[in-house]
Image (tube, grey):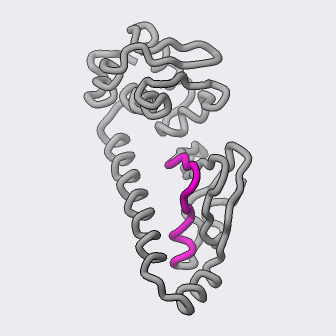
């Protein structure tokens, strides 16, 4: 764990190596992965700007190398070196995160779990170009990405396997029909029952 949600500002980090999950905890204890980030990218930028609590928990999923700056040091840096590129860089990252959150909100509001899983499988597989290693993406992580529980994700994977859209075993998930999987991701259930 790099830092925890709702704790005093940990400042901003730049991920230079590794992979990090940004996680929101729900009141029921379920976690949702709001983003999985890879180098080179900033995270926890809200906290460095306003000095407030961390908006999410950050967990390294691979050995990480990060650079960190506290709220106080950041404010001092901006005062001494008022470079617009610093602000523009932060705004670009924040805009990308805002778009991601808006898309997630839309998915959660309007799409069933099956569609969200189909979309996630396409993302993790590079639109079907590579096999998904299950040890790198366990069922609990998949469930956290789509704001569901492992049992429902497991049923979704079974349904997609039965319909020939994916091949799935304990080690890997392979997209077999990218086009139909994309249709499920966009349109919802397409008559599939869960």
Image: magenta residue range: 34-49
Residue at the location (54% across, 88% down)? 81
Count up the numbered dots: 0
35 drawn magenta: yes
Specify the quadrant that holds the C terminus: top left
166 drawn magenta: no
- Whole-percent x and y of residue 21? 60, 48
Residue at the location (60% across, 69% down)? 12
* Relative side of 25 to 87, left or right: right
- Whole-percent x and y of residue 159? 43, 13
- Whole-percent x and y of residue 168? 54, 14
Residue at the location (41% across, 29% down)? 127
Question: Would you place residue 6 above or below residue 109 in this image?
Answer: below
Question: Would you place residue 190 above or below residue 3 in this image?
Answer: above
- Whole-percent x and y of residue 103? 34, 47
* Relative side of 65 to 151, left or right: right
Residue at the location (44% across, 34% down)? 123
Please name whichever residue, 16 or 72, is drawn nearer the observer in this view of the structure: 16
């Amino acid at each position: 764990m790099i830092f925890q949600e709702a704790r005093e500002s940990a400042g901003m980090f730049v991920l230079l190596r590794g992979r990090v999950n940004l996680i929101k905890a729900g009141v029921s204890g379920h976690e949702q992965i709001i983003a999985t980030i890879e180098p080179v990218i900033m995270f926890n930028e809200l906290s460095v700007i306003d000095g407030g609590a961390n908006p999410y928990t950050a967990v390294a999923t691979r050995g990480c190398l990060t650079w960190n700056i506290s709220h106080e040091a950041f404010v001092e840096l901006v005062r001494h070196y008022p470079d617009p590129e610093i602000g523009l860089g932060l705004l670009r990252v924040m805009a990308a995160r805002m778009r991601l959150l808006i898309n997630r909100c839309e998915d959660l509001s309007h799409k069933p779990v099956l569609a969200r899983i189909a979309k996630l499988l396409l993302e993790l597989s590079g639109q079907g170009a590579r096999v998904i290693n299950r040890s790198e993406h366990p069922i609990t992580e998949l469930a956290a990405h789509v704001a569901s529980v492992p049992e429902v994700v497991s049923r979704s994977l079974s349904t997609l396997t039965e319909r020939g859209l994916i091949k799935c075993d304990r080690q890997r998930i392979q997209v077999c029909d990218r086009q139909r999987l994309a249709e499920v991701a966009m349109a919802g259930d397409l008559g599939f029952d869960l």
